[in-house]
Amino acid sequence: MASVSGSRIRRSGRGARAGDIVVVKVGGSTLGEGDSTMPDLIALQKQGLKPVVVHGGGKVISDWVRLQGIQPEFVRGLRKTDKPTLDVAVAVLCGLVNAQLVAEIAAAGGKAVGLAGVDGGMLKAEVLDPELGMVGKIIEADASTIMAVLETGAIPVIAPAALNVNPEHSDGSDRILNINADTSAGHVAAVLGAAILVFQTDVSGVLDATRRLIPRMTRRQAKDLIDSGIANGGMIPKIEACAFAVETVRAGYIIDGRIAGALLQCVSGNDIGTRIT
């Protein structure tokens, strides 16, 4: 599992207090008709908190990759990100999805600024595995750009892309790396020293071997859940991100974002989803 010592963390001493910051990771599966994320974010602001959004968009990327006629490649069951796929992913995540979320916050009466992990050197990475192509492992995070946006009273909305610290080509064609959105959220929360990190998902939380909700767990229990194979698929990076972040963040939460007001309930301390400390 990830460790804070595994990447360099650069914090800014200015701006919002860490205790005010709530990092929320949202994905396409929890956004749509009936979703309350945007009103909840604005309600948190009115309470004096500082929400920061990190978003995914895997389904939208897959749809656009198919529209471009790009055939997916897999290595040991993992999607390979070649240059054409990366171009689509960056365009969709940092452009289409990011702008849509900023617009949704504006429509709900809030103010947001769209960012990508490459902005201001916020996220820096190296190639995770050459066989997987342009997929990155974050090695450094910097909070200064996010803090600057928070100082304006806006909600930062961050797309998961990172600067490649070791590009191989002089033409700049590999200067950006694709980063898992869950992993990005963990690093953003850690570098900000946020109060809490919340993952909005389309399940009730982390489930045990009998498919019952686990309301609370420690970092060690989270690791055991992954090692045993009980936690699998897309839940693994969420659990790992929480375990990474809670070295500097009070708690990480994995909740069902389809429930109206779920984010507000979580931040208010109500029992919802899974808490990792």
Image (cartoon, rainbow, N blue to C red):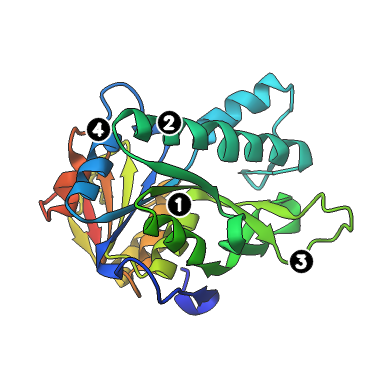
Instruction: Determine the secondary structure under disc 2.
Output: helix
User: For the residues carrying marks 2 and 4, which lies nearer the camera in this image?
Assistant: 2
- Viewer-closest of 230 and 116: 116
Find disc 1 in the rendering and name its residue. 182
User: In front: mark 3 or mark 1?
Assistant: 3
The image quadrant that residue 197 belongs to is bottom left
Distance of label 2 from label 4 (alpha carbons): 15 Å
* Amino acid type, mark 3: Asn
Crowd around label 1: few <14 · some 14–19 · many ≥20 (10 Å):
many
Q: Residues within 10 Å of mark 4 (few under 14, many from 20)?
A: some
The location of residue 178, given as percent across then percent down, is 63, 49
One can see residue 212 in this view: no
**Residue at the spot x=45%, y=52% of the render?**
182
Q: On screen, 270 above or below 14?
A: above
Sequence-wise first label, 3 or 1: 3
Q: CA distance from mark 2 to mark 1?
A: 22 Å
**Is disc 1 placed on a helix, strand or loop?**
helix
Left or right, residue 275 beside residue 132: left
Residue at 24% across, 56% down? 49
Amino acid marked by disc 1: Asp
User: In the image, which disc is placed on residue 36?
Assistant: 4
Give the vertical position of 124 relative to 131 (above or below).
Answer: below
Which of label 3 and label 2 is nearer to you? 2
Report how far apart the C-alphas of labels 3 and 2 lie in the structure: 35 Å
Image quadrant in which the C terminus is located: bottom left
Q: Nearer the viewer, mark 1 or mark 4?
A: 4
- Hey, what amino acid is under mark 2? Ala
Q: Secondary structure at mark 4?
A: loop
Q: Are marks 3 and 1 in contact (CB under 8 Å)?
A: no
Give the residue pinned by disc 3. 166
Counting labels gives 4
